[in-house]
């Protein structure tokens, strides 16, 4: 829950089946969190993309770690290129996700290029983000999508934690595509002739369900 002076959180326990006590995370440095940008849980902390009131762009990430009675908050910078996107549109081009390599990662759409950045917990050089991979979309998507006369917009629809896959949507005649960031394999899911909707996605649903605890 977003509040003017912080974020109010309650944690659900899969062991007890109960909700914990509500705690408030105070935002540092006049931060602004845009909750339309999906939160990512990584190593026990909830991560959001955020900015400041003076610069409401995707310039920082916020890690909130709920405790029994209080909350710890940590802020760190995003790669500079992410800052060109304003928070109210950042979800279409900048996404945090928990990668298959076991680290917090960020995917940045900068047509016609996608870059994947991995977060280094102990960035001794003062640069916490390391460029992991770049994908040139013109080689994997239909060439008509990048036709300037078509006026199609490309956006990130969803990232699939641990699977290394990313859903992309090309507005117009393009449709919905799934891209494997490691193999660069691209496939079209559907054409773009119906209303847009989002749905959760798990690469291996049977394994996921088998690992879930019984309530």
Image (cartoon, rainbow, N blue to C red):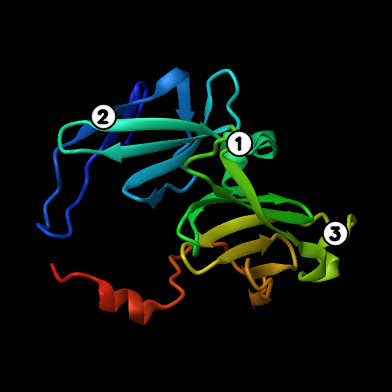
Are dots 1 and 2 in contact, CB under 8 Å?
no
Q: Earlier in the sequence, mark 1 or mark 2?
A: 2
Q: Residues within 10 Å of mark 2 (few under 14, many from 20)?
A: some
Number of the front mark, 1 or 2: 1
Label 2, secondary structure: give it.
strand
- Between the C-alphas of marks 1 and 2, the distance is 30 Å
- Would residue 2 be found to the left or right of residue 71 on screen? right
Q: Which residue is mark 2?
A: 24
Q: Image point 59% across, 43% down: which residue? A: 129
Q: Nearer the viewer, residue 167 or 135?
A: 135
Farthest residue in the front direction?
124
Q: Residues within 10 Å of mark 1 (few under 14, many from 20)?
A: few
Q: What whole-number distance in Å separates the C-alpha atoms at marks 1 and 3?
A: 39 Å
**Foreground disc of the pair 1, 3:** 1
First along the sequence among labels 1 and 3: 1
Residue located at (63% from left, 38% from top): 79
Name the secondary structure under disc 3: loop
Note whether 108 is above or below 123 in the view shown: below
In-image side of 155 versus 20 (left or right): right
- Screen quadrant of the N terminus: top left
Residue 1: tell me if it is visible.
yes
Q: Residues within 10 Å of mark 3 (few under 14, many from 20)?
A: few
Give the Cα separation between the discs numbered 2 and 3: 47 Å
The residue at which mark 1 appears reads as: 127
Q: In the drawing, does residue 141 fall left or right of residue 184?
A: right
Q: Provide residue 28's location: percent of width, then percent of height.
A: 41, 22
Task: State which quadrant residue 81 falls in.
Answer: top right
**In the rendered image, the vertical position of residue 125 relative to residue 120, given as above or below:** above
Q: Quadrant of residue 175?
A: bottom right
Residue positioned most to the bottom:
206
Reply above or below: 48 against 196: above
Circle 3 residue: 150
């Amino acid at each position: 829950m977003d509040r003017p002076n912080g974020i109010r959180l309650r944690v659900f326990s899969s062991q007890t089946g109960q909700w914990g006590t509500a705690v408030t995370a105070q935002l540092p440095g006049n931060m602004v969190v845009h909750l339309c940008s999906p939160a990512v849980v990584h190593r026990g902390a909830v991560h959001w993309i955020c900015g400041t009131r003076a610069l409401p762009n995707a310039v920082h990430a916020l890690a909130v770690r709920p405790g029994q009675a209080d909350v710890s908050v940590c802020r760190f910078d995003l790669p500079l290129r992410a800052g060109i996107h304003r928070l109210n549109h950042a979800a279409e081009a900048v996404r945090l996700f928990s990668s298959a390599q076991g680290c917090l990662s960020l995917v940045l759409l900068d047509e016609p290029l996608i870059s994947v950045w991995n977060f280094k917990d102990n960035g001794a050089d003062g640069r916490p983000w390391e460029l992991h991979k770049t994908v040139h979309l013109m080689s994997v998507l239909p060439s008509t999508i990048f036709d300037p006369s078509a006026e199609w917009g490309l956006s990130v629809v969803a990232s699939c934690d641990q699977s290394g896959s990313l859903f992309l949507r090309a507005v117009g005649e393009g449709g919905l595509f799934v891209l494997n960031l490691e193999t660069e394999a691209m496939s079209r899911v559907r054409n773009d002739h119906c209303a847009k909707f989002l749905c959760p996605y798990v690469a291996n649903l049977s394994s996921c369900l088998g690992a879930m605890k019984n309530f």
